[in-house]
Image: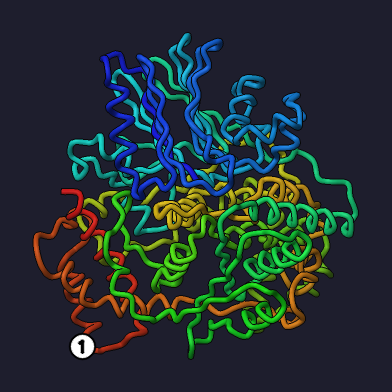
Amino acid sequence: MFAFSFAAGFRNCGSATDKARLMAANFPSEARDGIRTLDRPDVSATILRWAVVGRDQTVAPIWDGESRLAFAGDVRLYNRRELAVALGVERTSTAALNDLELAFLAYRKWEQDAPMHLVGDFAFAVWDERRQALFATRDQLGIRPLYYRLFTDGVVLASDVQQILALTDKPFADVNDEAIRDLFIPPVRRLGGTCFSSISAVRPGCSIVVSSGIASETRYWRPPRTPTGATYEENCQELRRIFRRAVHDRLESDRPIVAHSSGGFDSSTIVMAAAEIYKQESGRPPLVTASLTAPGFPCDERAYMDAVARRVNFETVRWNAFDDDPDWLKNPPLAYPGFARGLAGGPPRDLTLARERDAGVLLSGMFGDEVLIATNILLDLFRNGRWFDLVLDTLTAKQSVSLRVRTLVKSIAGVAPPAVLIDWQRRRAQHRQRPPTWLGPRMRAMYPPPLPEMPDLTGINWPSHVSMSLWQRVTSAQVSQIVDGTVAYGSTHGIEVRLPYADVRLVELMLSIPWEQRIPRDHLRRTARDALGPLLPEEFQKRIGQRSWTPVWTRNARRALPCISHLLTEGDWLSAPFVDRQWVLRTLETCVSRDDPDSSSWIELLDLASLEGWLRRLI
């Protein structure tokens, strides 16, 4: 894992160096394996290292005297062999190159088209000293973060908002009202924003060019234009192959690995695929599965956790979602309002486990739902006259009669073209949204909120509703925020988070599978179940879904009463522009007097308390 800072274009002597050093010093976690720096008259870069494999020890910012280019970033590549062949690098030389060096060679060859040739999790920046211009880019799905801020005479970039925030004199005055609105009145509507007006994020799948103090952005990753011509069986076989490759690539480590094993489809398939790889390849570092339990709650998945544990040779560590952990509300992040909560709002035992075992990697099943579920496939059935299949799938669904009827009625909307329907659904959702009762004056002034942004895909003729809804999900601001939070959960503690389902090869395959091959047959994840289901124990064969973890989140929020009460009732009310304090006090009094640990108001109160605590930290 790496974190970097980059300052370029500043004409004052030492200004770039001072900014890069200050940003490096303000990353939330201390570099385990040292810091490497690069200083030139108008550009400075630092890279903080947490070595996961041997070649990581050689990663450092690059200066190429011939091309006058400075290059730095956070790069983890999963197509090293294919990339080396395309670059004409000899096999003996490839092993000696670290991932950052390979990415630099790719930039030398393809320049701004380089990210189109990279498969992996990456964010990097290039300063062209001759042109006095900066190019920066981020991987297709935004697994590696990349933030930047423009100054009158230069630009800075970093891996974490907190690093750039160190250059801000008055963070409280820089709070972005729109970002606060999106955090507390979802969905997130803006791609590329942060909680601070002066700090922006490079959007996933995009690149920026900064020249003469102006930043321009370009999307380099676009969806496949034509469906695959393979049969359903061939596509399932290809899905298995790519998934195994995605897991195999993300198991590369010289240090122990912690893998989430929640009992769900996504994390369980990752663990089972990892078990097969470990059987075939000896000498790998220890892998331990981390499982959160919720005894007594319908969402508890221990039966499926047990089924996976019986089939693998990995050590399993479990903890209760309600275990006492007095540190879980301490040290809230500076980048955004929120507490350092673990899975389902419980203690972050997985991070503690990683530190105890000296693990360098945290494997997560996050992104599986976004990629595998065939959302809006029933609309395609209606649009293409497959009414018998539509009725059959609806009638066999494990739903109430009234819900089946509503599903059939909603499928009529499939007569509209995919792009038109997506836009209509966005507008309809906005129209139906009612303002929360806790809004303060500044938040009320921003109501109703604007429509969520959609990436500009002019000229794309979407072949189906299912493919466009998949693209909308994986490129949405809401999913981007969840990915950022998942990755930051580990990286701010020096642990590299890897998401096998967020593999661009896997996403592009799912986008190219024809809609006719995604017909649910009683399960919207049917294609994934047919392709990857054989990896799982037989206990998963009859599984339909899983219960919501909201009651667990609610109960854990109730456990934070002392912290909530302190932040909401004592001290100056800095949240006044956003939140009506009288509403908060009335709601808190009601929840406490009723002593109802299952009231959903507890989650709302905890979130609003996190906003107040965050604002006080910024003063």
Judge by depth and name the residue closer to the eye, 87 or 378.
Answer: 87
Where's residue 595, x and y in %?
A: 26, 89
In the image, is residue 45 above or below residue 290? above
Q: Please identify the quarter of the rendering in which residue 419 is found.
A: top right
In the image, is residue 471 above or below residue 520? above
- Kindly identify the residue that appears in the image at 64 percent across and 66 percent down: 266
- Kindly identify the residue that appears in the image at 31 percent across and 24 percent down: 17
In the image, is residue 316 above or below residue 531? below
Q: Note whether residue 130 is visible.
A: yes
Q: Please identify the quarter of the rendering in which residue 610 is found.
A: bottom left
The residue carrying mark 1 is 593
Where's residue 542, x and y in %?
A: 74, 82
> Is label 1 in a helix, a strand or a loop?
helix
- Kindly identify the residue that appears in the image at 43 percent across and 57 percent down: 489
Q: Note whether residue 113 is visible.
A: no
How many residues crowd mark 1 within 10 Å: few (<14), some (14–19), many (20+)?
A: few
Q: Residue furthest front?
A: 283
Amino acid type indicated by mark 1: Ser
Q: Residue furthest left?
A: 571
Where's residue 608, x and y in %?
A: 27, 64
Q: Please identify the quarter of the rendering in which residue 153 is found.
A: top left
